Amino acid sequence: MNMKTILTLLILAILVADPAAAQSRKKRPVSKSAAPRAKKVESLPTPPPNTPEAPAVKSETPAAGTTATKPARRKRESLSFLYGSFAWLWWQEPLELVGPTGTRYAMVTTANGPCFGAGWRKLLPSWEWGMHGCFFSAGNEVGATVTNVGYYQQGVESYGIIAGPNVLVRPREGRVGFGVQLPLFFRYAQWTLPPTPGYEVTNGTRITGGALFEGNWTGGRITLAQKIGVFYGTGTLWALQLNYRF
């Protein structure tokens, strides 16, 4: 073999060896990146809720054959009691002076005085009802409403009773109540007669009924009340009252 032949064989050997080395270099990166891809395939997706792998959400629906229990309601409390009362009354009522010939002259009496009494109350969360009565002793001032009749009395005592049921609403279950009382009014007075014979004063005794608007405030054992209203054929009455629960 000459030198030319040897050189030719060496060149051919180099050309054959280069493609094999290139292929080995290309396969190495593929083997390295295959491992992470295999890990991704092995990881499992997160199971949806209420599947055997995830904890079940609690259901509010009662099981079959059982009944749902409702929360117990707070019992509405009520309270009933007796009480004593002290009130001061003011009222006006019409009277008539009858002359010897039967002529009638209009008069008005204005009275005020204390009233001692007692009552019974039934308190509920949003309203109340009860009974109340008191005995009064009042001083009266009486005068004719016409100028040609000279009749005037002052300090005439009258006695009587005011008693009846009442019903009140208590907004928002509070301490304040508003309502009405429907009492009977009995009053006795011995009017002084004019010095001229034949005259008399009507309505020495009066029995009638009426309606009073009442508002009160309760704190502990004490209740403050105000009443104002009318009596049939009598006129207006106003009372300021203090109650004490026994």
Image: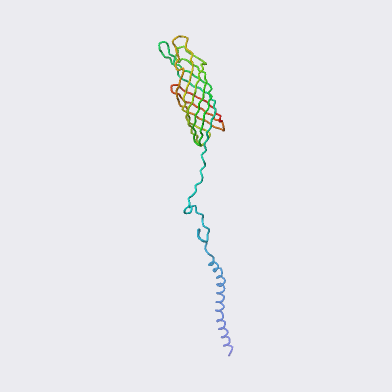
In x, y percent, where is residue 3?
A: 59, 88
Residue furthest toward the top? 196
Quarter occupied by residue 38: bottom right
In x, y percent, where is residue 229?
A: 47, 25
Q: How many marks?
A: 0
Up the image or down, 201 lies above or below 225; here it is: above
Task: Give 70 or 19, whichever is nearer the viewer.
Answer: 70
Task: Give 34 or 3, whichever is nearer the viewer.
Answer: 34
In x, y percent, where is residue 156?
A: 51, 16
Quarter occupied by residue 146: top left
In x, y percent, where is residue 218?
A: 54, 32
Location of the N terminus (image quadrant):
bottom right
Residue furthest toward the right? 3
Task: Give 236 or 80, whichever is nearer the viewer.
Answer: 80
Residue furthest toward the bottom? 1
Q: How is the image coloured?
A: rainbow
Quarter occupied by residue 246: top right
